[in-house]
Image (tube, grey):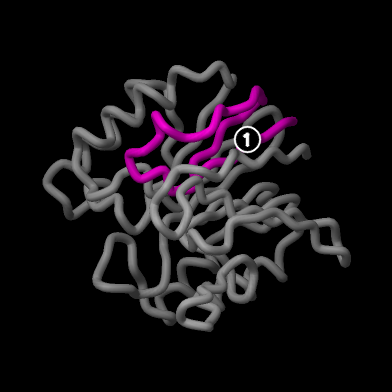
């Protein structure tokens, strides 16, 4: 299965590099700039236009309108469903025998969408099923594509890093930290890590999609 990964397009999807062919197209959150419903609808139509057999998306910390407490959260989810996009929020979907699990939560930052304290994130991460093959989270795990050079610190999720080490994943796909775009394979077990941020630190949509085969 060929998986094409993008993330953090921030409503700049029309200007990003071309998206290559594949079986599953994944967006790991922050499809909007400010979480407006019109941004979601525009993105959903664009996302659907690609030929990939299945399309999966999760929310990110900018995607306020997907939070259940938001007045238009139902409309946002319906916009994705109406375009045939699989939206995952602490949920799984099986495609051709491969189990995908998606979760939007990130450490608290400026009171943005889907923020959670560490204790709550331990609880959230414990819910990730043992038989997950491909894990999609908006933010990175601690010390894995999570470094912010300007602050000289790692800002990833420690509970997520612990949970990943307990699982037998084939791939972990994330975004959120624009400065840490990249791809790597862990030598100890072959686990593929992807930070698929499309936008760079200046919010320019310059990073190409990342392809992984599983």
Q: Residue at x 71, y 63 (%)?
A: 167
Front one among 186 and 126: 186
Picture quadrant of residue 1: top right
The answer to whether 121 appears left or right of 194 in the picture is: left
The spot of residue 128 in percent (x, y) is 57, 59
The spot of residue 52 in percent (x, y) is 58, 21
Q: Is residue 183 above or below residue 97?
A: below
Q: Is residue 125 magenta?
A: no
The spot of residue 53 in percent (x, y) is 59, 20
The answer to whether 33 appears left or right of 199 in the picture is: left
The spot of residue 214 in percent (x, y) is 78, 39
Instruction: Name, please, the residue furthest toward the left.
Output: 71
The answer to whether 153 appears left or right of 134 in the picture is: left
Q: Residue at x 63, y 35 (%)?
A: 4
Q: Is residue 25 magenta?
A: yes
- Residue assigned mark 1: 4
Q: How many marks?
A: 1
Q: Is residue 158 above or below residue 174?
A: below
Q: Residue at x 42, y 56 (%)?
A: 104
Q: Is residue 11 above or below residue 8?
A: above
Front one among 24 and 165: 24
Residues shaded magenta = 1-28
Q: Tag 1's secondary structure?
A: strand
Q: Residue at x 54, y 38 (%)?
A: 26
Sort mark 1 into few (<14), some (14-19) or many (20+) by Cα contacts within 10 Å. many
Instruction: Name, please, the residue furthest toward the right.
Output: 188
């Amino acid at each position: 299965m060929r998986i094409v990964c993008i993330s953090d397009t921030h409503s700049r999807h029309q200007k990003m590099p071309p998206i290559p062919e594949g079986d599953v197209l994944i967006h790991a959150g922050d499809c909007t700039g400010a979480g407006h419903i019109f941004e979601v609808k525009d993105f959903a139509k664009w996302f659907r236009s690609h030929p990939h057999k299945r399309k999966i998306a999760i929310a990110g910390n900018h995607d306020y309108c997907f939070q259940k407490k938001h007045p238009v959260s139902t409309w946002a989810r319906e916009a994705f469903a109406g375009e045939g996009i699989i939206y995952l929020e602490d949920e799984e979907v099986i495609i051709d025998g491969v189990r995908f699990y998606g979760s939007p939560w990130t450490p608290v930052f400026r009171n943005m969408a889907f923020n959670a304290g560490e204790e709550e994130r331990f609880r959230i991460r414990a819910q990730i099923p043992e038989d997950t093959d491909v894990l999609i989270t908006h933010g990175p795990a601690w010390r894995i594509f999570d470094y912010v050079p300007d602050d000289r610190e790692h800002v990833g999720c420690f509970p997520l890093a612990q949970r990943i080490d307990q699982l037998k994943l084939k791939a972990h796909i994330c975004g959120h930290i624009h400065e840490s775009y990249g791809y790597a394979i862990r030598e100890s077990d072959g686990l593929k890590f992807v930070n698929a941020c499309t936008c760079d630190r200046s919010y320019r949509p310059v990073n190409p999609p990342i392809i992984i085969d599983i």
